[in-house]
Image (cartoon, helix red, strand yellow):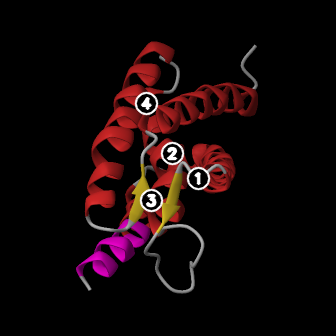
Amino acid sequence: MRNQVLLWAALIIPWVSLLFIPKDAKRYISTGLLAFFLSLLVCEIGVANRWWRFLETTYPLAIFSSYVYGFFPTAPVWILKYTYGRFWLYALVDTVANLVFAYLVLPWFASRGIIDYNAGLIVFIFESVIAAVLYVFQMWQEGVK
C-alpha cells in the first residue's frame, strides 16, 4: 500500500507542480515531452536488455513505473526554466539530478521492491545524453544560432 501511495505521488505531484510554473516557462513544455519520449525509449531498452525490471506499477500504467510518467516530462521543464541560457549551470544541475536519480532514488525504489535495478552507470549515461539532446532541442526551438 505504501508503495502505491509513493508511486501515485510520483505521478501526480510533478504534474501539479507545473501549475505553479511561470508563464514564460511554458516554452519548455515541448522539450519536456521530448524528454518523456526519449526516457520511454531508454526504459524500453533497459527492460529489453534486463538492466532493470519494473516490479510494481500503478493501474492502468502497467508497463513502467509512474515516476517515468511524472518526473521525466516535468523535471526538464523546471531545470530549463532556471538554467537555460547558461549551459554550464544547466549541465551541472542536470548532472547532479541524474546522479541523485541513478544512485539514490532508483536504489531506494529497488529496496522497496518497486524496481529490480542494477545499472546505475547506464542510467546516468543515458540520462546525460538525453540532457544534452534536450538543450540542443531547446536551442533549436528558440531559434538560437
Tell me which amino acid carries mark 2. Val
**Image location (x, y in percent) of residue 35:** 62, 46
In the rendering, which numbered label is found on residue 50?
1
Image: 1 above or below 92: below
Alpha-carbon span between mark 2 and mark 3: 8 Å
Q: Residue at x 43, y 69 (%)?
A: 11
Alpha-carbon span between mark 4 and mark 2: 11 Å
Question: Which residue does the numbered mark 2 point to in the structure image?
Answer: 77
Secondary structure found at label 4 = helix
- Left or right? Give the position of 11 relative to 2: right
Image: 16 above or below 26: below
Q: Earlier in the sequence, mark 2 or mark 1?
A: 1
Residue toward you, 1 or 141: 1
Tell me which amino acid carries mark 1. Arg
Secondary structure found at label 1 = loop
Tell me which amino acid carries mark 3. Leu
Secondary structure found at label 3 = helix
Question: Which residue does the numbered mark 3 point to in the structure image?
Answer: 18
Labels 4, 1: front one: 1
Image: 38 above or below 136: below
Mark 2 surroundings: few (<14), some (14-19) or many (≥20) residues within 10 A: many
Q: Earlier in the sequence, mark 4 or mark 1?
A: 1
Question: Which residue does the numbered mark 4 point to in the structure image?
Answer: 94
Whether pointer 2 and pointer 3 mark residues with C-beta atoms closer than 8 Å, the reply is: yes
